[in-house]
């Protein structure tokens, strides 16, 4: 499972960086979205990979911490998801405004001279 | 100490949040009401920030100990609680932010708040984000405050619309979104190694990190540092900054000049707290890189200042020089240099804020024409009379307007170039004196090459700023056609004069101000009292904690 997850994070991050460096605004936004997916997965696995483990002790229970999942990265990733969902939406608006004002979807607002 | 006073610490966050939320509900037609709310809020924020500064600076029971105020949200015990912490540095930044915000919001009343929707609400949210980031004692919360202020700043950077702003805003948003992702990587790596996000708790755990995890920790700290350096505008991460700042509306650009200082603030706080002298094997991790990046930024800014044709770009590059100088001075890791560097930070931020607003007044009438709908700087030419929005004059046109603008411009030049008699001179002089002062105990005798380099760069950057500002001043003030006098209102020139008067006050009151800065610096270099203050804050009440 570690291998699959790290491959997934690596692929997402690699594609994201490549797209982020492309000259078209739509590619840039897709790159940002892919990168944020990669980072959300990364945050999740910072709390160690556990399957089927409860994150909290039951009331009155005294437990072994190694038998529990770390709940904090899960809550962190929730915040990160919310934020990384909202900001590309804002970027999308600017992207459309830029397309409307400059008439091109190049990130510099003008086509490079051939 | 009453219980009500305890809650003073949360007001810098709550006030702008409430004001911003209320203003979203009020229709744009109620201009007077919204203006009153926004100015009232910023005045209250200034009062709160000043009160915090005085309370934090007040000598506590144990004489000579720096006070740390801790406010635990939800009253959970630390380190589980999310804490707001006010010490001297936070209080200083709060005062700087609110003074600049006051000037900027008053300036915007004249015309800029009508250039687009929800200007005042976004302005308040930006203030909330800034204040929260200055006060927070938790790494992940710092991320949330960063995102809040960035979201507001995206809106403000685009305020007024127009092709130039949208083009610059597109780059600005893309760079900052990518930076936020780096921030997250850094935070999660640090959490993965240490298991905590509370800054004070982190500082106690970092010396105990085993050697095999240290690489991961340092990688996380470096990635995190990159995120803050982008914000502060360090070379080579700063190419977006002059373009964005010069394209933004002047009152917004003035606020952005303090936003850049947020990056500097975080580096100052985290680097000295987490990688100070007590942090074991990682002590002063990355210090040389900070010094080199700071100096490279000064060089880049100095060249940029000379190369810019447009005064707004010149001001943008001045932001870089200012950030770079503070960073390089802090990276020398000498208490005596950090205090003057903080003094320089305050005086240069005030001057750059004033300059951004002044530029718009100077440029008015220089390039008449252009289109009225896109409220770009060029739009405010001689066609003012045709502008339907201009019928309700608030102030009156000042006679001898060019004289006043010219004096303000000279004031900004003096502060930024570091010439006497204003505060820029004192700041640079104090930095250099401390650099070449007698070495303290435990310091190597002799002057390190980095100090020489910093000396040369400080003086050279002052010279290039002087040349560039003089050239720009002659072009705008002397070669102007007298028939195109800019129409300036009292309400627009007053904030600039007040900001410059603030730098003059810094000069006159240099001794107590410098004493405060030195106390701040020595508290930063002795973080034990900060750590103890946060970790042992008593439950159930929030009281000023003194260390020893």
Image (tube, coloured by chain):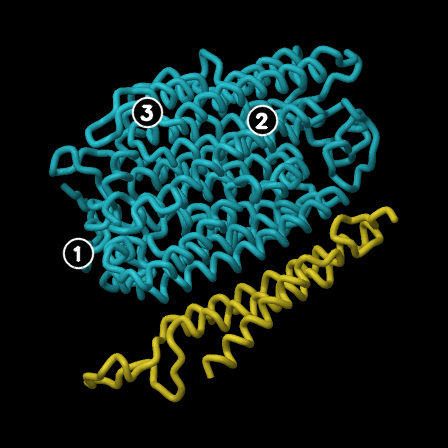
Callout 3 secondary element: helix
Location of residue A24 with respect to B85 vertically, above or below? below
- Give the x, y percent position of residue B512: 29, 22
- Indicate the colour of chain B: cyan
Q: Which mark is residue B513?
A: 3
Task: Decide if residue B85 is in sight here.
Answer: no
- Give the x, y percent position of residue B88: 30, 38
- Give the x, y percent position of residue B305: 62, 26
Task: Look at mark 1 in the image and give the residue it sits on.
Answer: B538
Q: Which mark is residue B464?
A: none
Tell me whether marks 1 and 2 sit on the same chain. Answer: yes
Q: Quadrant of the C terminus of chain B?
A: top left
How dense is the environment of label 1, judged by Cα within 10 Å: few (below 14), some, or many (20 and up)? some
- Give the x, y percent position of residue B250: 63, 34
| Residue B308 lies in quadrant | top right
- Residue farthest to the left? B62
Q: Are marks 1 and 2 in contact (CB under 8 Å)?
A: no
The answer for which chain carries disc 2 is B
Mark pair 2, 3: CA separation = 28 Å
- How many numbered marks are there? 3
Task: Look at mark 2 in the image and give the residue it sits on.
Answer: B302
Comparing B306 with B262, the one in front is: B306
Callout 1 secondary element: loop
Q: Residue at x 77, y 41 (%)?
A: B374
Q: Quadrant of the N terminus of chain B?
A: top left
How dense is the environment of label 2, judged by Cα within 10 Å: few (below 14), some, or many (20 and up)? many
Q: Are marks 2 and 3 in contact (CB under 8 Å)?
A: no
Task: Decide if residue B469 is in sight here.
Answer: yes
């Amino acid at each position: 499972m570690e291998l699959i997850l790290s491959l997934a994070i690596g692929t997402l991050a690699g594609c994201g960086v490549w797209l982020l460096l492309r000259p078209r605004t739509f590619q840039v936004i897709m790159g940002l979205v892919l990168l944020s997916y990669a980072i959300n997965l990364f945050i999740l696995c910072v709390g160690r990979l556990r399957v089927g483990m409860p994150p909290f002790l039951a009331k009155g229970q005294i437990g072994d911490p190694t038998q529990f999942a770390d709940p904090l990265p899960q809550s962190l990733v929730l915040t990160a998801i919310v934020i990384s969902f909202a900001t590309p939406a804002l970027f999308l608006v600017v992207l459309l405004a830029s397309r409307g004002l400059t008439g091109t979807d190049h990130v510099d607002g003008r086509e490079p001279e051939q | 100490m009453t219980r009500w006073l305890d809650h003073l610490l949360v007001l810098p966050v709550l006030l702008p949040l409430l004001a911003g939320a209320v203003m979203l509900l009020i229709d744009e037609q109620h201009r007077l009401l919204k203006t009153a709310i926004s100015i009232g809020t910023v005045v209250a924020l200034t009062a709160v920030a000043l009160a915090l500064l005085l309370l934090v600076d007040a000598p506590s029971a144990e004489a000579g100990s720096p006070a740390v105020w801790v406010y635990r949200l939800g009253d959970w015990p630390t380190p589980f609680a999310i804490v707001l912490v006010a010490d001297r540095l936070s209080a200083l930044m709060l005062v700087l932010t609110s003074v600049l915000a006051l000037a900027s919001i008053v300036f915007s009343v004249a015309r800029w708040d009508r250039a687009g929707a929800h200007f005042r609400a976004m302005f308040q949210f930006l203030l909330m984000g800034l204040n929260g980031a200055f006060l927070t004692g938790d790494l992940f919360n710092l991320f949330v405050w960063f995102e809040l202020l960035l979201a507001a700043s995206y809106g403000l950077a685009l305020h007024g619309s127009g092709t130039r702003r949208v083009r610059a805003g597109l780059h600005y948003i893309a760079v900052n979104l990518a930076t936020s992702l780096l921030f997250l990587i850094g935070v999660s790596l640090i959490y993965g190694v240490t298991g905590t996000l509370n800054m004070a708790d982190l500082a106690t755990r970092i010396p105990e990190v085993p050697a095999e995890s240290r690489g991961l920790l340092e990688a996380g700290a470096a990635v995190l540092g990159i995120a803050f350096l982008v914000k502060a505008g360090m070379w080579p991460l700063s190419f977006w900054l002059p373009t964005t700042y010069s394209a933004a509306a002047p009152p917004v650009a003035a606020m952005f000049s303090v936003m850049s200082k947020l990056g500097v603030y975080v580096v100052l706080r985290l680097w000295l707290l987490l990688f100070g002298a007590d942090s074991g094997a990682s002590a002063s991790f990355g210090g040389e890189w900070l010094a080199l990046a700071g100096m490279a930024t000064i060089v880049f800014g100095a060249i940029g200042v000379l190369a810019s044709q447009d005064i707004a770009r010149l001001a943008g590059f001045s932001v870089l020089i200012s950030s770079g100088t503070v960073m390089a001075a802090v990276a020398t890791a000498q208490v005596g240099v950090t205090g003057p560097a903080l003094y320089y930070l305050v005086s240069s931020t005030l001057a750059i804020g004033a300059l951004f607003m002044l530029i718009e007044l100077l440029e008015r009438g220089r390039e008449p024409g252009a289109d009225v709908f896109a409220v770009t700087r060029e739009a405010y030419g001689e066609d003012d009379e045709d502008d339907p929005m201009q019928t309700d004059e608030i102030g009156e046109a000042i006679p001898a307007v060019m004289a006043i603008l010219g004096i303000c411009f000279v004031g900004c030049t003096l502060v930024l170039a570091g010439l006497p008699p204003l505060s820029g001179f004192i700041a640079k002089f104090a930095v250099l004196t401390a650099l070449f002062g007698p070495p303290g105990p435990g310091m190597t005798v002799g002057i390190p090459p980095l100090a020489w380099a910093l000396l040369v760069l400080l003086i050279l950057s002052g010279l290039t700023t002087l040349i560039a500002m003089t050239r720009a001043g002659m072009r705008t003030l002397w070669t102007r056609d007298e028939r195109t006098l800019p129409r300036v209102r009292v309400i627009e020139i007053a904030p600039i004069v007040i900001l410059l008067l603030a730098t003059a006050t810094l000069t006159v009151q240099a001794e107590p101000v410098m004493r405060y800065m030195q106390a701040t610096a020595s508290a930063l270099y002795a973080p034990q009292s900060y750590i103890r203050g946060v970790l042992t804050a008593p439950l159930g009440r929030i009281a000023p904690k003194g260390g020893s």
